[in-house]
Amino acid sequence: MRVGRRRVAPDVGWVSSEIGTQKVAGLMPHIELHLHTKAGSADSSISVDALGERAAELETGGVLVTEHWRVWTEGERAMFTDRWGVQTYPAIEATTDAGHFLVLGAEPGVSLPHDTSELLDFTSSRGLFVVWAHPFRHYFDGIHTSQRPSFEPGLSPEELAEHPAFARVDAIEVENAGSTERENALALEVGRILGKPLTAGSDAHDLEHVGARRLPVAAVPTELGELVDLLRSLTLEDHL
Ligand SMILES: [Zn+2]
Ligand SMILES: [Zn+2]
């Protein structure tokens, strides 16, 4: 089951022609960014094998597993790719005082700062690629301040875009299948102002959400450098 039909790019799995809409399987490969398994995220119910099986079934060519607590080792990633034919890349989802940041290229065993500017000092000194994940999750919710993002309520997109961390991250996640439409729309609006690369992710924590957001790609990146190049090339048009 694919959750959510809205995609970040034209739905290339289906094409229109004068004889109607036809399914063209395998026309373009897909990758999926931002998901969690039981191997490194206490709040995920997806086993590593279940992820591999589901990704292979959906013909997803690569997955960016961004656990909360640790980076998969090279050995784990190699075993996954050997078994399921699905590429993986080293990454983690770091939690700071400003929210969640996907750090691509993080080393297994790394311990990342919880202060946002310290995290971004760390990542920039090592040339790591950082995506601000779901920056406005809970922004519109009347919840306890400890759960709220670090933005004042009621700000305009222009004011929100002035948060210093936006200037320092490499990309912004503007489509997250675990966020509300309103939160994603605000992220897109702010991303438009910032003019940075904009990404999409399923943020799957259960099997039903694997595949909820995928990116069609010309070719599946075989290593991290190729993935980073691809993410750097993502523009606003990919999300309209
Ligand atoms: Zn998150
Ligand atoms: Zn996540």
Image (cartoon, grey):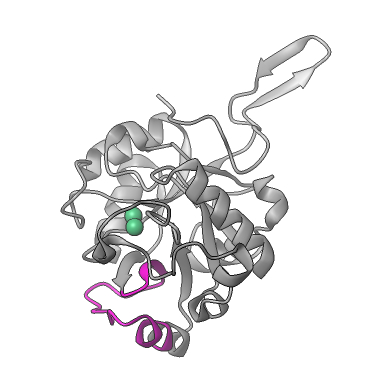
Observer-nearest of 85 and 36: 36
Instruction: State whether residue 71 is above or below residue 87.
Output: below
> Quick check: 86 left or right of 111?
right
Whole-percent x and y of residue 50? 25, 36
Q: Which residue lies furthest to the top in this view?
A: 19
> Quick check: 27 left or right of 129?
right
Q: What stretch is highlighted in magenta?
A: 97-121
Q: Residue 57's image quarter?
A: top left
Instruction: State whether residue 72 is above or below residue 140.
Output: below
Quadrant assignment for the N terminus: top left
Quadrant assignment for the C terminus: top right
Question: What residue is shown at x 53% (from left), y 65% (from top)?
Answer: 155
Whole-percent x and y of residue 102? 40, 65
Q: Residue furthest right?
A: 18
Question: What residue is shown at x 59% (from left), y 64% (from top)?
Answer: 156
Observer-nearest of 43 and 145: 145
Question: What residue is shown at x 51% (from left), y 76% (from top)?
Answer: 163
Q: Residue 186's image quarter?
A: bottom right
Q: How many marks?
A: 0
Using the rendered image of the protein, determine whether residue 93 is visible from the camera's viewpoint.
yes
Observer-nearest of 134 and 226: 134
Does the segment drawn in magenta span residue 120?
yes
Using the rendered image of the protein, determine whether residue 72 is visible from the camera's viewpoint.
no
Does the segment drawn in magenta span residue 135?
no
Q: Residue furthest left?
A: 42
Whole-percent x and y of residue 11? 64, 32
> Quick check: 50 left or right of 121?
left
> Quick check: 217 left or right of 79?
right
Question: What residue is shown at x 56% (from left), y 63% (from top)?
Answer: 226
Whole-percent x and y of residue 194? 65, 69
Q: Quadrant of ligand 2?
A: bottom left
